[in-house]
Each structure stands twice: as C-alpha cells, then as structure tokens.
Image: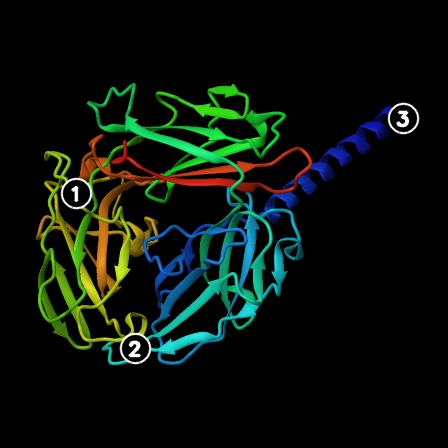
Amino acid sequence: MNRKSILFFTILLIFFTLSSGASTKAEKFYYQNAIYHEEIKTVQLYRVGSELSNPEYVLGSDVALVLKFDDLAEDTKNYSYTIIHCDADWNETYLQQSEYIDGIQDNQITDFAVSKNTTVKFVNYQLQIPNEDCNPKLSGNYALVVFEDNDRNNLVLIQRFYVVEQLVSIEPLVKKATFDPFNGANQEVDFKIFHEKLRLLNPRDEIKVVLMQNRRWDSAIRNLKPSNIQDKILSYDYSKENVFPGGNEFRFFDIRTARHNGENVGEIKFVRPYFHAALIPDELRSNKTYNPYQEMNGNYIIESQDRVSDYDTECDYEFVHFFLPLPSQLLGGSVNVFGALTGWNANKTNGMKWNYERGGYELALLLKQGYYNYQYVYVADGAKKADAENIEGSFFITENEYQILVYYRDQASRYDRLVGFVIANSAVK
C-alpha cells in the first residue's frame, strides 16, 4: 500500500471515528424539569405526606414519592410515564431500563379525578413512585417522564427526582463567607464526607459533589474536589469555590380563598370566567435593610380556607397579577417571577412585560389556590443563571436551605450512584 492510500484510509478512519463520537454524544439526552403543554399546571413531586419535601426517595424505603399535576381540560387524557436513569449531570446513562427498573418500563397513569365546584375545569392526575409496576433498583438521578397516547415523543412533562443509598454521612457547616469582598453578603458551605462503607482508591475522581441553594440547579456548584483527604474522611473547606450569595427572604402571598384579600393581596375580583387577584405592588429591595421573617424558601402549598374536602380537586384557579415598579426598564435581559411556582425556571412563560404608563414590570400567572413564595430575578440575554441580587438584595444572615448530593462511581461502574444526600440550613449553627 503506497503513502497516498495510507493517508486516504487514515483520514477516512478519523472521519468515521469523529462521526461515531458525535453520534454517540447526540444520543445522550439532558433531562431537566419541564412542562411541554401550556394547559398543564401545578406540577408537584414530593415525599408522600410532606408537600414541602425534596423529591428524594431512599432506596428500599416505605416512603414513596407522589407526582401531582392538573390538566386544564374537561376530558381525561391517555397519559403514561416512565423513569430514566441519569448521571450526576442529568445526562441519560448508558444502561438498559431493565437494569434499573424492577417492573414495566412504560405504564399508564390511572389515578385521576375531575375538579368539583371550580370556575376553572381541570383533571387532577396523581402517581406514586415506586409502585407495583415500576420500582427503581439503582440509586442515582432519575427523570420522571410523562407522555401522551403511549408515544414517548409526545412529551407532557419531566420532573427530576433522586434515589439515595445512604452509604456516606455528611457533616455540613453553613456560615458567613470567610473571604467576602462583597460587604458580607455571601454564605459559605463547608462540609465533610465520612465514607466508612466505601473503599475509595481515587477520591478526587470517584466522588462527585453538588451543592444547591434552595433546590436551584441553575446556580448549583459542581465538581468540587476535596481540600483534604484523611482516612475515611473527605473535607471540603474552601473560602471562594463553595460560596453563594445570601440573597433575601422570599416574598409571599396568600390566595387560599377568594372571599377576602389574603396576605399581600390588594384586590380580588371576578371577571368571567376567572377570578383575578392583584398583589400589592412590590418594591425594589436591593437598597433596603434586611427584614427577617418566616417563609418557605421559594416553595408553595396547595390549600384552601373555604369549605372543601379535597384540595387536589376543589381548589380553584385564578389569575395572580404581579407588579414591580422600577425607576427604568432593565435592558439586555428579562425580569422574571421565580420560585417553585415557575418550576425554578426563568423563561418566556414567567417573563414580565414593561408597562411604560405604570413604570414597572407586570405579569399575570394562572395559579391554584394556596400559599406561595416567589422572588424577582434578572436573566441576562444568553445567561443560564438567574440573578436575584440586583432586585432583591443580598445578606449573609438570610435563612437558606442547602442541598448537598454525593455521587460515587468507581472505574468498573457504568453509572453514578447517589450515596449521600443531606439538607443544611443557614440558620442552624
């Protein structure tokens, strides 16, 4: 074979290698919380009996997770679901579903009920994981995928949840940031991992950690390496790499009844066919002092103060009107209402519009009766992270909830095991 032939086949081999790698990479799907139909509302995933809990299932536990959502339609739909195992970065793992599911891969959602005595008609759907038909066998990140008409391409919603095998213990410490050039506005999250049950050969590569503030994946800190390695103990004690803005306490409003104005509701009126709740106009808080009060770290609960027997089917929907006065319009990005009520996402569905006549940002969201937390965030064009500091302010004494997740993968494994999960609160010293 002459040199030209060798060169030709070498180039051809490189081409097919790159093509194969690109194809393999494209097959991996990144899963995030998402709603694909605008009529799907009030998507919640939590531990049974604890509406404010994280979607965390301990492998083999008797406490299941429950998914609830409403479809603003009078007729029932043919909804199915499956669960997908993901790596620590929420890409689909290269495992067959039979390897991590004990049961059937695709199942129908059979628990549903039509709304009663509400101005807005809807169907409430519910599902528990695990169940007799679908039981996760492995720990790790999972995506719960709901689709319509037995067609996985006809997506309805995706919700993330965690399956934990608690093989390590985590000792967290949240404190004022050690190195803080921003006038004491930041919080530092140090922690130790005790791994008596794991034999680690290369902890820096075998262990991955994720730090989250108030369940926010957009601002999560990843890929921290242990600052100190001792026998059975990994220490993560940094002064810059593990720092979050303290932020501010979440704003709140109460729409548990339409008979009178709840907290921070200025007016309620019925304009057929909907109730409308106008919140008291908010204020810019970045130029104000810190005001402590109890809140739910951005979450919400579905509840009614009216005489109802079932919150899921008898709590009504109403348009909630937000208004944030500002000295001028913010250019180069969007202002969004943010929190669990928007799925911790900042996108077009919760982006606010500038009202020139009123001099501020406004938005109306269709929400179910309940008690809600929220904040205003600014998202620069092209940015993946929402910024609340410029509007809400930031203080190191703000009460925040932090989630620490510890993943383990040795050289022989094909997936990331979730071996530790803990919640730390900045108010607990």
Residue 88 in view, yes or no? no
Q: Which residue is mark 2?
A: 121
Image quarter hosting the N terminus: top right
In this rendering, would 65 be left or right of 132?
Answer: left
For label 3, the crowd category at 10 Å Cα-Cα, with few meaning under 14, some 14 to 19 and many 20 or more, is: few
For label 2, the crowd category at 10 Å Cα-Cα, with few meaning under 14, some 14 to 19 and many 20 or more, is: many
Number of the label disc, if any, that sits on residue 124: none
N-terminal of the two: label 3 or label 2?
A: 3
Residue 256 in view, yes or no? yes
Query: How many labels sit on residues?
Result: 3
Q: Which residue is mark 1?
A: 329
Residue found 10% across the figure and 40% down from its top: 327
Q: Amino acid at mark 3?
A: Asn
Residue found 54% across the figure and 39% down from its top: 167
The percent position of residue 106, horizontal first and vertical second, equals: 58, 66
The percent position of residue 316, horizontal first and vertical second, equals: 24, 72
In terms of secondary structure, where does tag 1 sit? loop
Mark whose residue sits in front, 3 or 2:
2
Mark whose residue sits in front, 1 or 2:
2
Q: Which residue is mark 3?
A: 2
Colour option used: rainbow
Residue found 34% across the figure and 72% down from its top: 72
The relative height of residue 67 versus residue 388 in the rendered view (above or below) is below
Q: Amino acid at mark 2?
A: Lys
Q: Amino acid at mark 1?
A: Gln
The relative height of residue 237 versus residue 355 in the rendered view (above or below) is above
